[in-house]
Amino acid sequence: DIQMTQSPSSLSASVGDRVTITCRASQSISTSVNWYQQRPGKAPILVIYAASSLQSGVPPRFSGSGSGTDFTLSISGLQPEDFGTYFCQQSYSSPPTFGPGTTVDV
Amino acid sequence: QVPLVQSGAEVKRPGSSVKVSCKASRDTFTNSAISWVRQAPGQGLEWLGGIIPIFPVVNYAQKFQGRVTITADKSTTTAYLELDSLKFEDTAVYYCARDVGYCKNDNCHTKGDFEVWGQGTLVTVSS
């Protein structure tokens, strides 16, 4: 199985900050990475798919980049509703696997 | 219309089975796949398997092979996850998610692009 790691595991930021989360795959996975936001007690929400494509309805302050083994999720102009945990996930090969998550405290 | 609606919370004894349902739209059943992902308390996310309802084709994570069964009822556009021989460590929120199905060389698979998620079903295994 492909292992996904994330850093940092948690971060604190202020409203208006730019936040960057990194994700690394244990082998090359092209651009087959998705990013999800999960608020406490809620189901995950897809925010970025295929490494850099913004999911419909997601604000453009979210962006993603990377290919191969290294990926980033950025949030520019952090808003209070952006708190929660962010997971990266690879869909390059089965089984799909997730990173351990990065908790963003606003 | 809410895309995916799951059944309610369950409390089960160790060694028993649980069956969780996921009601989807007809469009999802016709044009998409449905995967099941679980999240133990305070933990990360783990894929159990997925189904392409129109065929149907089912893929399972090797870890759960033999203990999990995923089915789909086209008449009611409902997918089901059944997990047998429950252990304490199966306590988790179980989510269904709309996924993408694809076929290559006559083999069809769920891709693992989880576009929309159900609200989750808490399964508690307790003696």
Image (tube, coloured by chain):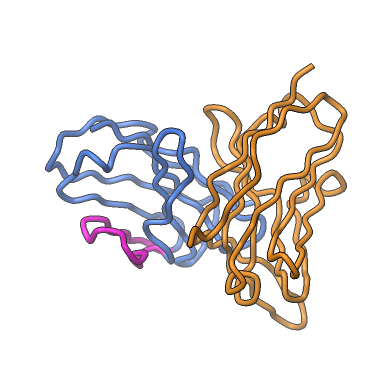
Q: Of residues B31 and B111, which is closer to you in this image?
A: B31
From the image, which quarter does the C terminus of chain A lie in? top left
Q: Position of residue A16 (x, y in %)?
A: 12, 43
Percent position (x, y) of residue A36? Answer: 42, 50
The residue segment tinted magenta is A51-67
Identify the residue at image location x=49%, y=64%: A32
Q: Quadrant of residue A105?
A: top left
- In the figure, the shade used to draw chain A is blue
Does the magenta run of residues contain A66? yes
Up/down of A16 relative to B122, above or below: below
Image quarter for residue B90? top right
Against A72, is B106 above or below?
Answer: below
Identity of the residue drawn at 26% across and 51% down: A74
Depth order, front residue of B25/A51: B25
- Residue positioned 44% across, 45% down in the render: A87
Quadrant position of residue A93:
bottom right
Most extreme residue toward the left, as rendered? A16
What residue do we see at 85% from left, 39% from top? B84
